[in-house]
Image (cartoon, helix red, strand yellow):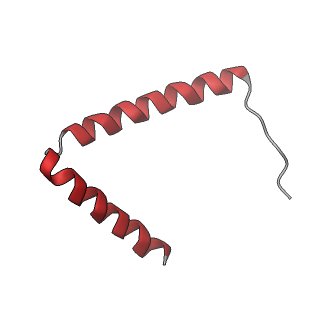
């Protein structure tokens, strides 16, 4: 059985820093997609996720 875990203060700082980097990369990727394509792309990605979880 899994035991509860908590992050140390340093672990929390590192996690927050990593999340910030990931969010910045995600924002750059999304900015590269024309607005008129973004909705369709997100719908396609949802279909891909559903196909992998079925």
Q: Residue at 42% of width from left, 35% of height from top? A: 22
Q: Residue furthest bottom?
A: 54
Measuring from the top left, give residue 34's x and y in whole percent: 13, 45
Quadrant in the rendering for residue 12? top right
| Location of residue 13 by image quarter | top right
Front-most of residues 46 and 10: 46
Residue 36 image point, x, y percent:
13, 50
Closest to the observer: 44 or 1? 44
In the rendered image, the vertical position of residue 26 relative to residue 39, given as above or below: above
Give the position of the N terminus as an image quadrant.
Answer: bottom right
Total number of numbered discs in the rendering: 0
Question: Residue 14 in the image: x percent, y percent?
Answer: 58, 25
Q: Nearer the viewer, residue 14 or 26?
A: 26
User: Whole-percent x and y of residue 8?
Assistant: 74, 25
Q: Residue at x 35, y 69 (%)?
A: 47
Rendered image quadrant of residue 32: top left
Residue depicted at x 55% and y 27%: 16
Does residue 1 lie above or below 47 as drawn? above
Q: Is residue 51 above or below residue 36?
A: below
Query: Against 30, is 10 above or below?
Result: above
| Identity of the residue drawn at 49% across and 73% down | 53
> Seen in the image, is 6 located left or right of residue 39?
right
């Amino acid at each position: 059985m899994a035991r509860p875990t908590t992050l140390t203060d340093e672990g929390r700082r590192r996690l927050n820093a990593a999340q910030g980097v990931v969010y910045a990369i995600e924002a750059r990727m999304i900015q590269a997609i024309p607005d008129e394509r973004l909705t369709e792309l997100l719908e396609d990605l949802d279909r891909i996720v559903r196909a992998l979880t079925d």
